[in-house]
Amino acid sequence: MEPSLPETREHDPLTSILPPEQMAAVAAALDAFAAEPGALLEVLHAVQQRLGHVPPAAVAVVARALNLSRAEVHGVLTFYPDFRQTPPGRHVVRLCRAEACQAVGARALEAHARRALGVDFHGTTTDGSVTLEAAYCLGNCACGPSLLIDETLHARVSPSRFDALMRQARGGEA
């Protein structure tokens, strides 16, 4: 009996569980990092960078490629709050919850943001425009409370300024 050839990723039945765009992102991440020791975090970051999230179906593909269990990949994916398993809204708001920002009103801002957006942390508004996430220091401690909207840092954000920033971010959207 001849030994069977190892399956290539193209012929792996697990690859059919992902849409082509998602499989291309996972394959690119694996091609870039799979050979490195401890590649899992790099692979997950690369997939999220390209897709905005790590699809749950990618767990099996990544696990097989890195010779890990699905539980190991799922554990890492769910342990770190920066990884998303669903697509984010059109804008991602990361509100600083570190001590320096809390000392100058971040908790009140947090409560206002959750109420105004109608979502909790890691949630996306029903119109898909905003995803609210927590950050644990944005490096702007002297000017808190701080938040990021997409990649733009905003300092000394009050509830009324938050509302204005959200109107601006959502402006021009349907």
Image (cartoon, helix red, strand yellow):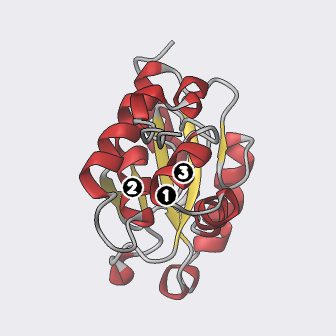
Residue type marked 1: Arg
| Discs 3/1, front | 3
Whether residue 149 is situated above or below residue 107 in the rendered picture: above
Query: Residue drawn 55% across and 37% down?
Result: 130
Asked if disc 3 and disc 1 are in contact, CB closer than 8 Å, the reply is: no
The numbered mark, 3 or 1, whose residue comes first in the sequence reads 3
Residue type marked 2: Val
Q: Which of the 4 image quadrants contains residue 129?
A: top right
Callout 3 secondary element: helix
Asked if disc 2 and disc 1 are in contact, CB closer than 8 Å, the reply is: no
Counting from the top left corner in percent of width and height, residue 125 is at 66, 34
The residue labelled by disc 2 is 43
Callout 2 secondary element: helix
The numbered mark, 3 or 2, whose residue comes first in the sequence reads 2
Q: In front here: 169 or 85? A: 85
Query: Residue drawn 43% across and 75% down?
Result: 144
Q: Residue furthest front?
A: 1
The numbered mark, 2 or 1, whose residue comes first in the sequence reads 2
Counting from the top left corner in percent of width and height, residue 24 is at 36, 30
The circle drawn on residue 64 is: 3
Evaluate whether residue 83 shows in this view.
yes
Query: Residue drawn 33% across and 47% down?
Result: 29
Distance from disc 3 to disc 2, alpha carbons, whole Å, reads 13 Å
| Discs 3/2, front | 3
Q: Which of the 4 image quadrants contains residue 61?
A: top right
Q: Residue furthest left?
A: 32
Q: In front here: 14 or 47? A: 14
The residue labelled by disc 1 is 94
Residue type marked 3: Arg
